[in-house]
Every structure is written in C-alpha cells, then in structure tokens.
Amino acid sequence: GQQLNQSPQSMFIQEGEDVSMNCTSSSIFNTWLWYKQDPGEGPVLLIALYKAGELTSNGRLTAQFGITRKDSFLNISASIPSDVGIYFCAGQLRSQGNLIFGKGTKLSVKP
Amino acid sequence: DGGITQSPKYLFRKEGQNVTLSCEQNLNHDAMYWYRQDPGQGLRLIYYSQIVNDFQKGDIAEGYSVSREKKESFPLTVTSAQKNPTAFYLCASSMVTEAQDTQYFGPGTRLTVL
C-alpha cells in the first residue's frame, strides 16, 4: 500500500528548542492529521487539517495543510521533556475512506 | 467516559492457535478500523468497517478475520494462518462524513506468539 514520506526519521534536541517535521506524498489528500504516540500506547490526535492552505495551532503545536494538497508540516515551539514520543502524519485520499500513515518521527528531548 | 477500549493490553499465544482481540467504542462512530504496528514502521491497515455487517480488507488482511455484528464492537481474530503475528494492534473509530473522517485510537493490544 501507499505510504507517506515523513522526515526526519528521528530528532535529538535540547529542551526549549523548536522542532519541525514534515510529510510529503505523490497523491493529493483532502485531510491531513497529526498524531503523537507514547511507548506502548495508542496514537493521540494532535491536529486535524481539512482545507488546503489551512494553518492550525494547538498550544505550542502548529500544523499546515500544504497548498498543493501533497504535503503538511508540524512545528513544536519551545520543546519540553514531555514532548518526547513518536509523531505520525496521516493523510486521507479523495477516493478512499481509510488513512495512509507516515513511518513516524521519533523525538528525543534533552533536559 | 466516552472512548475506545481494547482488551487485553497484553496477549500471549502459542503458535498455531487462533486468538481474538476485542475493540469497543461508545462514541457512536460509524466506522471502525484495525491496524498493525511493527517497530520502525508506520501503521498498516488490516480491516475496516463503515457500517454494521459490512467490512473491507485493508493492505495486510491475510491471516486475519473480523466481524461487525454491532455498531460498538469490531473484534479481530488473528488466525494460525498469519505467519508473523507478533505485533502491536491498534483499533480506531471515526464518524463518516463528506467533510471529515478523523480517526481516534484505542490504547492497543500487544500480541506475542511464543
């Protein structure tokens, strides 16, 4: 099945730094979602995007739906230790109801 | 509380045995999904159902079976035909509308084949 290209694969940053990650696809999506997963737990929805060009914030998190509908990014400002985890992007194709997931970005934060 | 529950959290099975993973939701969502997660990989879709008594195969359905007799429940059976069943299994649910299809996940079941 099709997968999204999510980068970077992993990040090691200092507490207080900003973080940026992105996903790209060769296909057009009509929905982009960003999830965070802690070890041994299910993914938790962070931000949902439904319109091209849409920029949405959730606290220190900001995500954008690319204007071409083929990409999205997630920024985390002023990172803290509890931001540690794996972040997944997911897109929904126009013709299907199920989501396509990226392979995740593993974030490590040094206090 | 509203949400998605999966049980058990950890499951051990002997090779050659079938095992059923439970998924229940009280969100009144129409659609339910099963994903498999392996280390270093994203989530891969096993089966999904958008309405009671109907379901479709995902990308990796071989060796799995499901049923959707009730809106709230979508159990997954891992059969002995699944060659590499050890993995983390995630259930999700969503409303199905033209504008939105946001999926919410349960806490997962870790299956280990001994």
Image (spheres, coloured by chain):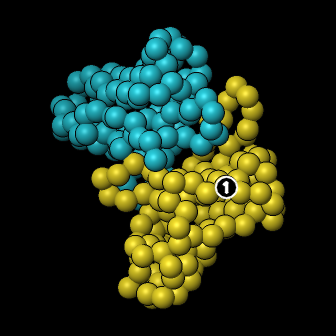
Chain colours: A cyan, B yellow
The amino acid on which the numbered mark 1 sits, given as a three-letter code, is: Gln
Q: Residue at x 41, y 28 (%)?
A: A26
Which one is in front, A61 or A104?
A104
The answer to whether one can see residue A74 in this image is: no
Query: Would you say B87 lies left or right of A77 here?
Result: right
Would you name the residue on which mark 1 appears?
B56
Q: Would you place residue B68 above or below residue B15 in this image?
A: above
Under tag 1, what secondary structure?
strand
The one nearer the camera, B98 or B3, is B98
| Residue B79 location, quadrant | bottom right
Please state, as top left, top right, bottom left or bottom right, where the C terminus of chain A lies in the image: top left
Chain where mark 1 sits: B
* Horizontal side of residue A78 vs A61, given as left or right: left
Q: Is residue B104 left or right of A34 when viewed as pictured?
A: right
| Residue drawn 71% across the image and 57% down it | B55
- Is residue B78 visible in the rendered image? The answer is yes
Q: Position of residue B8 (x, y in %)?
A: 56, 72
Left or right: B76 as drawn, with respect to A80: right
- Compared with B26, B76 (above or below) is below
**In this orientation, which residue lies closer to the viewer: A15 or B16?**
B16
Query: What is the x, y in percent for residue A24?
Result: 38, 27
Point 43% across, 35% down: residue: A89
Q: In which quarter of the image is residue B76?
A: bottom right
Q: Where is residue A58 in the image (x, y as percent from the top left)?
A: 49, 23
Q: Which quadrant would residue B88 be assigned to in this image? A: bottom left
Q: How many marks?
A: 1
Q: Position of residue B114 (x, y in %)?
A: 38, 85
Q: Residue at x 60, y 63 (%)?
A: B6
**Is residue A11 placed above or below B31 in the rendered structure?**
above
